[in-house]
Amino acid sequence: MTVDDENAGGVEYPTPHHVVDHTAEPTDNPLAIRLEQLILGAERRYTPFQAARTAGVSMDLASRFWRAMGFADIGQARALTEADVLALRRLAGLVEAGLLSEPMAVQVARSTGQTTARLAEWQIDSFLEGLTEPPEPGMTRTEVTYPLVELLLPELQEFLVYVWRRQLAAATGRVVQAGDDDEMVDRRLAVGFADLVGFTRLTRRLEEEELGELVETFETTCADLVAAHGGRLIKTLGDEVLFAADDAGTAAEISLRLIETLKQDATMPALRVGIAFGTVTTRMGDVFGTTVNLASRLTSIAPKNTVLVDGAFAEELSRTGEAPESEAQAAEEAARAEKEGGTPPSYRFALQPMWQRPVRGLGVIEPWMLSRREPKIPG
């Protein structure tokens, strides 16, 4: 099944959809059937038509929900359970109660399906595969799988709900602190791309396993640093990550930490980062708009191991006192403080204006190079 990219709108970096056929054609494999019943908690009972009718939902709307969740068309095979009926009732009930519009309910189904599909694929491919190595000679992997899933399922379910609630609480807190109603949809954020330099050439030299380890190290390092310093990892694209932060100072700290950390790893290629600040449209966990495109362009022209930012980002750093408007201003403030016996302002970051250049679709831009401001040693 293909899901249309409803959100692209000309944006160059849409989130790739990862759709998994959760309700593929029923199998006759006894172990597969037992595992399915264990995981779903119920036996197959309904055809799609029967499930929709039992839930009191039209077949058309039920099909839209199932496709949005990433479920394959199964004709009229008897493959659905009471849980499928209950899920339909809940979504349709939210629409009937006026809590969600029908298009929004479909979006809820799609975002949930895409996110959990990727999680389930990872757990099967990486997590369960490693754990189901037969513990004793003569045992098969299939003999180990059922008891392992039986033990893990309730724990993983509880953990998933816990993490989701924590993330939902954090996201809700950020939104309700917006300055006005418009900012609750179109928000002003710092958006950054971090890109490994020369990754394409690297893919021709490394073995697949080495390349996989490098990408995993890169993504893990970026995810940990972004989270630890107050940002949000929007998505990973193999050799590139997209992150966002509510303020310019946080984004600046993250970008410089990324470069400083990866430079210490001799196996990693150089990194370049581009950040822009401005209005961003958020949808289904992704970010869109001119600000995102500008951050991407800045990344593509950044020299290795440097951070380029746009003028709006530089202005925001100056406005919040994180960086001086210019080195001349900083020198004047230091001289005035010395003359008056006071303490000059302390800035975390330095900004150096770079060359102006035209960027396709965005006009002429003037990047600024971001760096840490070296503390002045008295005397």
Image (spheres, rainbow, N blue to C red):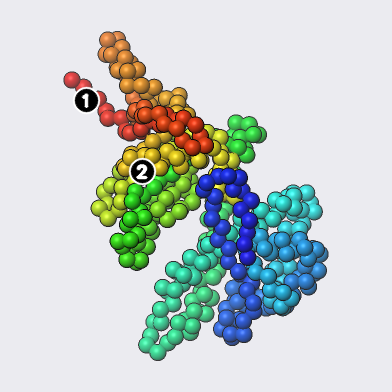
Q: Residue 351: x, y in percent?
A: 36, 28
Q: In this view, does 176 lie to the left or right of 85?
A: left
Number of numbered discs overlaid on the protein picture:
2
Most foreground residue, 157 or 282: 282
Residue 377 tag number: 1
- Residue 227 shows up from this direction: no
Most foreground residue, 1 or 146: 1
Q: Residue 331: x, y in percent?
A: 30, 17
- Measured in 3D between alpha carbons, the distance from the residue under mark 2 to the one under mark 1, in whole angstroms, is 30 Å
The answer to whether 197 is drawn above or below residue 250 in the figure is below
- Picture quarter with the N terminus: bottom right
User: What residue is rendered at 72% in x and 51% in y?
Assistant: 103
Secondary structure, mark 1, is: loop
Q: Is residue 55 left or right of residue 187?
A: right
Q: Residue 51: x, y in percent?
A: 76, 70
The three-letter code of the residue at mark 2 reads Arg
Please give the residue where the numbered disc 2 appears in the rendered image.
272
- Decide: few, some or many residues near mark 2? Use Cα within 10 Å; few <14, some 14-19, many ≥20: many
The three-letter code of the residue at mark 1 reads Ile
User: What residue is rendered at 54% in x and 52% in y?
Assistant: 15
Q: Is residue 102 left or right of residue 280?
A: right
User: What residue is rendered at 58% in x and 85% in y?
Assistant: 29
Secondary structure, mark 2, is: strand
Of the two numbered discs 2 and 1 on the same chain, state the one appearing first in sequence: 2
The answer to whether 16 is drawn above or below residue 43 in the figure is above
Please identify the quarter of the rendering in which residue 85 is found: bottom right
Please identify the quarter of the rendering in which residue 135 is found: bottom left
- Picture quarter with the C terminus: top left
- Decide: few, some or many residues near mark 1? Use Cα within 10 Å; few <14, some 14-19, many ≥20: few
- Residue 299 shows up from this direction: yes
User: What residue is rendered at 61% in x and 48% in y?
Assistant: 7
